[in-house]
Amino acid sequence: MRIAAGFGTTLALALLGCGPGGVEHEIEERPLDQAVALDTIVQALAAKSVESATFVTVLLPDQTEWTVDVVGTNLPIAVEFLTAQDRERIGDRVPIQATPDEMPRVVMVQRKDTQESLMLRVFTDQHFRFQPNPPPDMPEAPYTIREVEARLRRDVADFIAWYRANNAPPAP
């Protein structure tokens, strides 16, 4: 009886030792939903006292019409959150950061209804991804949707601060 119990334990340990070293997980990543991103952008603008309007038609530098996600109504800025489908349609008409760490580029566009010039800052869903269902044994901390929203909020606030620092009206 004792031999059988020892054999069972030995067999179990041997089987655990065989095979792959660990279970590899395919970690699902999702881009931030465009509706969530737009709400986040509008909230970030409001937190910096920028009133906004959504879905405003502008003329891109090549004179192509494009509906921008959010424009400032009391500050001449615009913010676009590009999805994969948007990137396909817009092509290379606006500068898109290759990586989140790359220096952001701003492009001048013209609001079609008022002919006002706006500084457009483009964000892309490729750089705002989260892990909705991380495995419990994930080696590093996952990016949650809240963290990604907070990063977008910070990036929009940084754009507003940059605009105000570099385009403030001269003192009287």
Image (cartoon, rainbow, N blue to C red):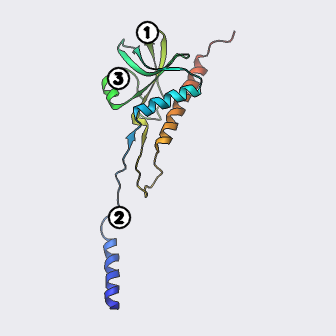
Q: Quadrant of residue 170?
A: top right
Quarter the C terminus occupies: top right
Q: CA distance from mark 2 to mark 1?
A: 62 Å
Quarter the N terminus occupies: bottom left
First reached walking from the N terminus: tag 1 or tag 3: 3
Pick whichever, 162 or 48, lies toward us. 48
Provide the residue designation for mark 1.
113
Q: Amino acid at mark 1?
A: Asp
Query: In this rendering, is residue 131 above or below 33?
Result: below
Provide the residue designation for mark 3.
92
Pick whichever, 1 or 60, lies toward us. 1
All told, the count of numbered labels is 3
Q: Secondary structure at mark 2?
A: loop
The x, y position of residue 168, in whole percent, is 61, 16
Provide the residue designation for mark 2.
21
Q: Amino acid at mark 3?
A: Asp
The x, y position of residue 77, in whole percent, is 51, 19
- Circle 2 residues within 10 Å: few <14, some 14–19, many ≥20: few
Of badges 2 and 1, the one in the foreground is 1
* 151 horizontally vs 4: left or right: right
First reached walking from the N terminus: tag 2 or tag 3: 2
Q: Quadrant of residue 154?
A: top right
Q: CA distance from mark 1 to mark 3?
A: 24 Å
The x, y position of residue 15, in whole percent, is 31, 73
Query: In this rendering, is residue 131 above or below 153?
Result: below
Q: CA distance from mark 2 to mark 3?
A: 45 Å
Query: In this rendering, is residue 79 above or below 26?
Result: above
